[in-house]
Amino acid sequence: MNSSRPYLLRALNEWIVDNGMTPQVLIDAHNPDVNVPDSVRSGERIVLNIAPRAVRELEIDNEYLSFVARFSGVSHAVLVPTEAVQAIYARENGQGMMFPDEDEETVSSAESEDADSSNKGPRSGKKTKRPNLKVIK
């Protein structure tokens, strides 16, 4: 199954821009496929402004986030794998989304598949556990 990350990136970017705010992405600087100017790399994470007024040729496809931007007055092509994007949010109010690490996402989907296969019904040989809900007043 395809990762939901690129779809959510596109949707949240559009939502933030439509509301007149500045979309920013938080990038894992340790990912070897992240292509940004060295002057931008200052720690473990990189924050990039991807607002239409700040970048040109923004493209968010299923594999990469790419655009052209100016850093210290010099144009640079930026290429970031979507799995290196840790969050997208609006600068003005912080609303947006943090993404799980790819490892966690893979484990979660594998656990879901195991749960689906083990809950196929009475023929699986395992009893299904009833939900345990309590009313709290």
Image: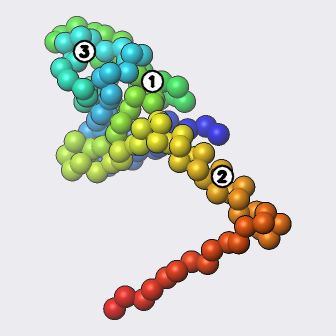
Q: What residue is disc 2 on?
A: 114
Colour pattern of the rendering: rainbow
Q: Nearer the viewer, residue 59 or 40?
A: 40
Q: Which mark is residue 81?
A: 1
As drawn, 59 above or below 119: above
| Position of residue 14 measured from the top left corner of the image (x, y, whole percent) | 41, 42
| Position of residue 117 measured from the top left corner of the image (x, y, whole percent) | 72, 55
**Residue, x 36% and y 47% (percent of image)?**
97
**How many neighbours does mark 3 have within 10 angstroms: few (below 14), some (14-19), or many (20 or more)?**
some
Q: Amino acid at mark 1?
A: Pro
**Residue, x 71% and y 63% (percent of image)?**
119
- On the picture, is 80 further left or further right than 45? right
Query: Disc 1 vs disc 2: which is toward the camera?
Result: 2
- On the picture, is 31 further left or further right than 62? left
> Can residue 67 be seen?
no
> Gap between marks 1 and 2, in whole Å?
28 Å
Image quadrant in which you'd find residue 32:
top left
Query: Disc 2 vs disc 3: which is toward the camera?
Result: 2
Q: What residue is disc 3 on?
A: 70
Q: Amino acid at mark 3?
A: Arg
**Residue, x 26% and y 39% (percent of image)?**
22
As drawn, 109 above or below 3: below
Mark earlier in primary sequence (3, 1):
3
Is disc 3 placed on a helix, strand or loop? strand
Q: Amino acid at mark 2?
A: Asp
| Position of residue 124 measured from the top left corner of the image (x, y, whole percent) | 79, 63
Mark earlier in primary sequence (1, 2):
1
CB atoms at circles 3 and 1 under 8 Å apart?
no
